[in-house]
Image (cartoon, helix red, strand yellow):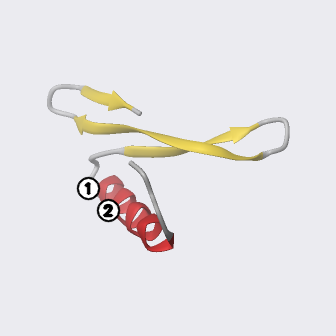
Amino acid sequence: MHINNEQGFKNYIAKTIKDKNNRLCYPFLIIDKENNKVAGCTRYGNVNTANKKCEIG
């Protein structure tokens, strides 16, 4: 996904939270341990509890 502006970022965050609340994904941050700052994010996505599988990234 490519985010071009602040509204795109807000939409991405809103959808991520909605998907997490619906148990469709599990997002998390990657922290740079040297400077203790956010380096990025990823998620377990397309969570399928019935078949016990998901996608990474």
Q: Residue 11 carries which label?
A: none
53 horizontally vs 14: left or right: left
Q: What residue type is labelled 1?
A: Asn
The furthest residue to the right? 34
Q: Name the residue under label 2.
A: 18
Q: Where is residue 17 in the image (x, y as percent from the top left)?
A: 39, 61
Q: Position of residue 11 (x, y in %)?
A: 38, 68
**Which quadrant, please, contains the C terminus?**
top left
Q: Where is residue 48 in the image (x, y as percent from the top left)?
A: 20, 35
Q: What residue type is labelled 2?
A: Lys
Tell me if residue 48 comes above or below residue 5 in the rendering.
above
Tell me if residue 2 comes above or below residue 7 in the rendering.
above
Q: Residue placed at 28% from the left, 49% from the top?
A: 23
Depth check: give the residue in front, 50 or 46.
46
12 horizontally vs 32: left or right: left
Q: Residue placed at 45% from the left, 58% from the top?
A: 3
CB contact under 8 Å: marks 1 and 2: yes
Q: Which mark is residue 22?
A: 1
Crowdedness of circle 1 by 10 Å Cα count: few (<14), some, many (20+)?
A: few
Depth check: give the residue in front, 25 or 3.
3
Tell me if residue 28 comes above or below residue 53 in the rendering.
below
Spatial separation of the CA atoms under disc 1 and disc 2: 6 Å
Mark 1 vs mark 2: in front:
2
Q: Position of residue 27 (x, y in %)?
A: 45, 46
Report helix, strand or loop for mark 2.
helix
Q: Quadrant of residue 16?
A: bottom left
Q: In which quarter of the image is residue 39?
A: top right
Q: Quadrant of residue 46?
A: top left
The furthest residue to the top? 52
Depth check: give the residue in front, 19 or 8.
8
Q: Residue placed at 23% from the left, 26% from the top?
A: 52
